[in-house]
């Protein structure tokens, strides 16, 4: 069990949680959403600039949460910048399948996000890892309701 926990909190996760990339508000954002994971206490608000071609020009987040939640949001914002809305949705599907253990067929390379795939061994942590993603999808789809993992 201890080896599993060590694998979960890999160096990359710790680095991203201590020094999250793209952390801060984005005054010129044209889409945003708020998300909460009541079970763990994670809360974040995501802001992005989506251009007329539905390309994510900039993306940032503010909030607080556990190491998994912050690392996931940090890595996600790095990976989504420059992606189209459709590419972002496909990456979410691939990431979600990996962390929930529901991937069928060959695994697709999800880059840095692979470090979070160990959460599938800890079902309550899946919500921590996916909160930022659900919130990002709500933002780019301009959904007005708060995102919750419950």
Image: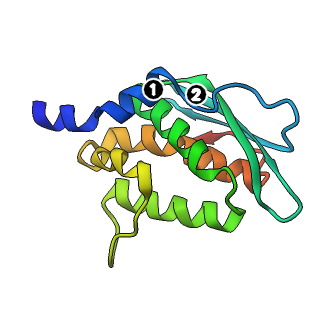
Quadrant of residue 9 within the rendered picture: top left
Nearer-the-camera pick, 100 or 98: 98
Identify the residue under disc 2.
Answer: 43
Q: Quadrant of the N terminus?
A: top left
Identify which residue is drawn at 38% across, 33% down: 13
Identify which residue is drawn at 40% across, 64% down: 109
Tell me: 21 left or right of 72. Answer: right
Identify which residue is drawn at 36% across, 45% down: 116
Quadrant of residue 67 within the rendered picture: top left
Helix, strand or loop under label 1? helix
Instruction: Give above or below for 63 relative to 125.
Output: above
- Using the image, tell me which numbered label, if any, was put on residue 118: none
Across and down, in percent, residue 92 comes to 53, 58
Across and down, in percent, residue 46 comes to 69, 37
Instruction: Give above or below for 5 relative to 32.
Output: above
- Using the image, tell me which numbered label, if any, was put on residue 17: 1
């Amino acid at each position: 069990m201890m080896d599993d926990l060590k694998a979960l909190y890999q160096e990359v996760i710790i680095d991203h949680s201590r020094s999250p990339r793209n952390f801060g508000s984005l005054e010129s954002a044209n889409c945003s959403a708020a998300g909460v994971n009541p079970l763990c206490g994670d809360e974040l608000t995501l802001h992005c600039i989506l251009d007329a071609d539905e390309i994510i020009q900039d993306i940032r987040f503010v909030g607080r949460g556990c190491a998994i939640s912050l690392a996931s949001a940090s890595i996600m914002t790095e990976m989504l910048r420059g992606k189209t809305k459709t590419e972002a949705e496909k990456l979410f599907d691939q990431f979600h399948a990996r962390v929930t253990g529901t991937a069928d067929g060959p695994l697709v390379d999800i880059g840095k996000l692979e470090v979070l795939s160990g959460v599938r061994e800890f079902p309550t942590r899946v919500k921590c890892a996916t909160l930022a993603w659900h919130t990002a999808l709500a933002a780019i789809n301009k959904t007005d309701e708060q995102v919750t993992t419950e």
